[in-house]
Image (cartoon, grey):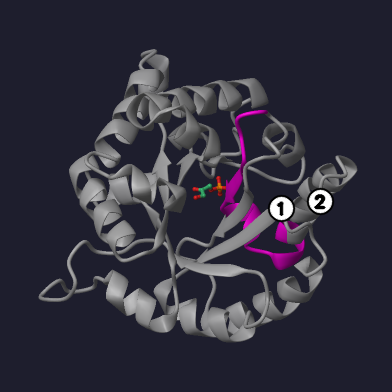
Amino acid sequence: MNRSRKIILASNWKMNLLPEDTKIYMEKLCPMIESMSSRLDIHTYVPYIDIQTALEYSKNSRIKIGAQNCHFENFGAFTGEISTDMLLSLGVKNVIIGHSERRKYFCETDEIINKKINKALNSNMSVILCVGETIKEKNAGIELEIVESQIVNGLKNINNKYLNNVCIAYEPVWAIGTGKTATSLEADSMCKKIRSTIEKIYGKEISMSTSILYGGSLNLENAEDIIIQSDIDGGLIGGASLNPEKFYEIIDRVNNIVKKEGKD
Ligand code: 13P
C-alpha cells in the first residue's frame, strides 16, 4: 500500500445476490463505512439486475456501484448485452473489464477487452482491468509474459489522458475461489511487474499513480498481509464480500492500517 495512491477495496458479487439481498446488503454496509478514512475507495460490482436497488439503497453513501462487464458498441442487435450508455443512464460510472471468468467462459480475447476498455473510457467511465495467469501458465513459468501481454494488448492505443480512470487488478486464475491465495510476496512482485509494464508504456508518473489491486481468495485472514505490500493498492474480493459484515471486517482492518499511519 502506497499512501500517495488511492486504496480501493472492491467487492465483485459475480452472479450472486438478488435485488432483495442487495437492499439488505446496502442497508447494512453503508452506515458502517461512513467514518472510514477518506483515502479508501469502496466499490461494489453487482449483477445488472441489482444495479438500481444498489444505487437506491446506497444513495448519499460513499460506495461506488459498478457493473461487471459492458459491450463495446452503443446499441444494436447484441442479445443479452449492456452498453456503457445504458449503464451511464442509471448513473453507473465504474466497470470491471476482462475478468478471467469473462475470458474463460465467454471467450473474451485481449482484442475484445481492448475494445471494451476503449469504449468505457471514451464514455468517461472508470475501468478495472483484470489480468492474471492460469495454473498451467504458472507451472510453465510464463506468468510474467502472460500478464504483461494482457496489459499491453488490453491497453493498446489507449491514450495516456485516460489512465487516471484505469485501475489494474492482478487476479491469478488459480487463486480465484480456490482458497489458495498468492503469498504476499508473489502478489507484490507481480504487481511491481505490472507497474513497470505501465511505466514502459506510459512513463514513470502515470505508473506511480495507477492503483493496482490484488484479487483471489482474499479474506479477513490474509487481506492485511497482502494489501500492506508496497505495490498493492487494495483488493478485488469475490466470495468474502458477499456478506456485508465480512466485507466490512476487511475494510475495517485496512482502514486501521491507514489510520495508524496518521496521514488521513
Ligand atoms: P474470490 O475472492 O472469490 O476468490 O474471487 C476473486 C475475484 O474473482 C474477484 O473479482
Q: Could you tell me if residue 182 is visible in this image?
A: yes
For mark 2, give the secondary structure: loop
* Nearest to the observer: residue 258 or residue 228: 258
Query: Marks 2 and 1, how far apart in space?
Result: 7 Å
- Report which quarter residue 218 is drawn in: top right
Circles 2 and 1: CB distance less than 8 Å?
A: yes
Residue 135: x %, y % from top left? 42, 26
- Report which quarter residue 74 is drawn in: bottom left
Residue 26: x %, y % from top left? 66, 77
Residue at coordinates 53% horizontally, 62% vertically from top-left? Answer: 13
Which numbered tag is attached to residue 39?
1
User: What crowding class fits label 2: few (fewer than 14 Cα within 10 Å), some (14-19), or many (20 or more)?
Assistant: few
Residue at coordinates 64% horizontally, 60% vertically from top-left? Answer: 42
Residue 79: x %, y % from top left? 17, 74
Label 2 CB-ligand 1 distance < 8 A: no
Q: Amino acid at mark 1?
A: Arg
For mark 1, give the secondary structure: loop
Residue 234 included in the magenta stretch of the image: yes
Q: Amino acid at mark 2?
A: Asp
Figure check: 63 above or below 168: below
Q: Which residues are magenta?
A: 230-247
Q: Which residue is mark 2?
A: 264
Figure check: 185 above or below 16: above
Q: Is residue 74 left or right of residue 217?
A: left
The mark nearer the N terminus, 2 or 1, is 1
Label 1 CB-ligand 1 distance < 8 A: no
